[in-house]
């Protein structure tokens, strides 16, 4: 029987952080969640939500008191600005007696990851997920309004991973032995094109979805109109137009770590189908 742990989850209101919280709770562990705005965190009952900001490490120090595990993100803000406070955060964690740390890889160089690897005395695990299944929610508005998806590079392959599986792997690494010094690439169970994803969503909602391929120029214009910074647009063009091998290769890490097979996109679509269905029109 796994001993009950107390874990501090940063990024707890994000796509992955909420899943880390849910998995820890489901296995009977005590969860403390860090938030810049605790009143708006909207986390499950039983979670201790505390105020803190990763860009101000000293504000995080009180939240580290008494925890055995720490889940860290490597970025902050709406456009994934890399955090520069990694060394101080890990210094505080070590001083507080934290035994295990997981880090959610942000897709690029990270002072947080560097500090985790360099800081002795803690068992660390880096989680390296490929594309999140939750990214499909970006299509929800167009599907609800016009039964349509408009995307560039529609033939690109993705081994996209269910965010719940990222949370499950994190929870194991934060509470069980055997994962120290590991860098876990996390994928789903299959390769999917954009067309494959659209077909799965159409089947889940019981209504066809039209797929239109945008040119690169059209995609860039749309992203600029949406206010995305140029560096983010550049990242998207590279990631979608020249997906690295790691993003289009299925691995079985999720099952090896958790003992359960990775969840497929069909399951994700069923879980989130309401987001892709138009609200019923009220009778007049």
Image (cartoon, helix red, strand yellow):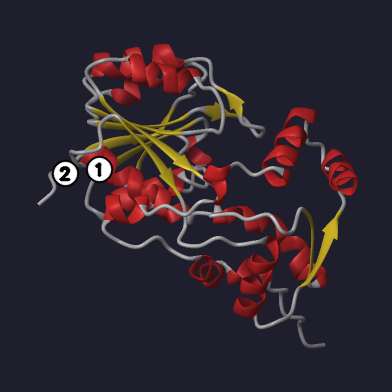
Q: Nearer the viewer, mark 2 or mark 1?
A: 2
Separation of residues labelled 2 and 1 (CA atoms): 7 Å
169 and 7: which is toward the camera: 169
Residue at image x 34%, y 47%? 169
Q: Which residue sits at x=64%, y=44%?
A: 243
The image quadrant that residue 283 belongs to is bottom right
Residue at image location 52% in from the left, 34% down from the top? 37
Q: In the rendered view, does 214 fall on the left or right side of 240?
A: right
Rendered location of residue 32, percent (x, y): 33, 37
Q: Is residue 245 left or right of residue 105?
A: right
Where in the figure is residue 176, as x and y percent of width and height?
A: 19, 42
The residue nearer to you, when weighing 251 against 203, is 251
Q: Earlier in the sequence, mark 2 or mark 1?
A: 2
Mark 2 closeness class: few <14, some 14–19, many ≥20 residues within 10 Å: few
Residue 227, position in %: x, y? 82, 37
| 193 lies left or right of 125 | right
- Numbered label attached to residue 179: none
Q: Say if residue 45 shows up in the picture.
A: no
**Mark 2 element type:** loop
Element assignment for label 1? strand
In the rendered structure, the answer to whether residue 236 lies left or right of residue 26 reads right
Q: Position of residue 257 (x, y in %)?
A: 28, 50
Residue drawn where x is 73% and y is 45% of the image? 241
Q: Nearer the viewer, residue 276 or 208?
A: 208
In the rendering, which numbered label is found on residue 4?
A: 2
Looking at the picture, does residue 88 appear above or below residue 169? above
Residue farthest toward the bottom in the current orientation of the protein? 284
Residue named by callout 1: 30
Q: From what the image shows, is residue 242 above or below residue 59?
A: below
Q: The C terminus lies in which quarter of the figure?
A: bottom right
Mark 2 and mark 1 residues within 8 Å of each other at the beta carbon: yes
């Amino acid at each position: 029987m796994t001993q009950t742990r107390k874990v501090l989850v940063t990024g707890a209101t994000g796509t992955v952080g909420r899943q880390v919280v849910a998995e820890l709770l489901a296995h009977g562990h005590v969860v403390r969640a860090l938030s810049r705005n605790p009143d708006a965190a909207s986390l499950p009952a039983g979670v201790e939500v505390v105020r803190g900001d990763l860009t101000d490490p000293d504000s995080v120090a009180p939240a580290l008191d008494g925890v055995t595990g720490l889940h860290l993100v490597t970025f902050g803000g709406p456009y994934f600005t890399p955090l520069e406070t990694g060394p101080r955060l890990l210094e505080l964690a070590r001083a507080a007696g934290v035994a295990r740390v997981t880090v959610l890889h942000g897709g690029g160089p990270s002072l947080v990851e560097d500090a985790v690897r360099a800081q002795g005395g803690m068992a660390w695990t880096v989680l390296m997920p490929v594309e999140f299944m939750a990214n499909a929610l970006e299509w929800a508005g167009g599907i609800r309004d016009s039964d349509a998806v408009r995307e560039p590079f529609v033939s690109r392959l993705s081994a996209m991973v269910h965010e719940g599986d990222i949370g499950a792997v994190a929870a194991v690494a934060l509470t069980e032995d055997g994962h120290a010094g590991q860098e876990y690439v996390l994928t789903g169970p299959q390769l999917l094109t954009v067309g494959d994803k659209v077909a799965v969503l159409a089947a889940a909602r019981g209504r066809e979805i039209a797929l239109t391929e945008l040119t690169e120029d059209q995609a860039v214009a749309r992203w600029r109109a949406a206010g995305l910074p140029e560096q983010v647009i550049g990242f998207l063009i590279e990631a979608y137009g020249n997906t690295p091998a790691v993003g289009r290769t299925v691995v079985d890490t999720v099952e090896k770590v958790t003992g359960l097979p990775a969840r497929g996109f069909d399951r994700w679509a069923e879980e989130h189908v309401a987001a892709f269905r138009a609200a019923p029109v009220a009778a007049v």
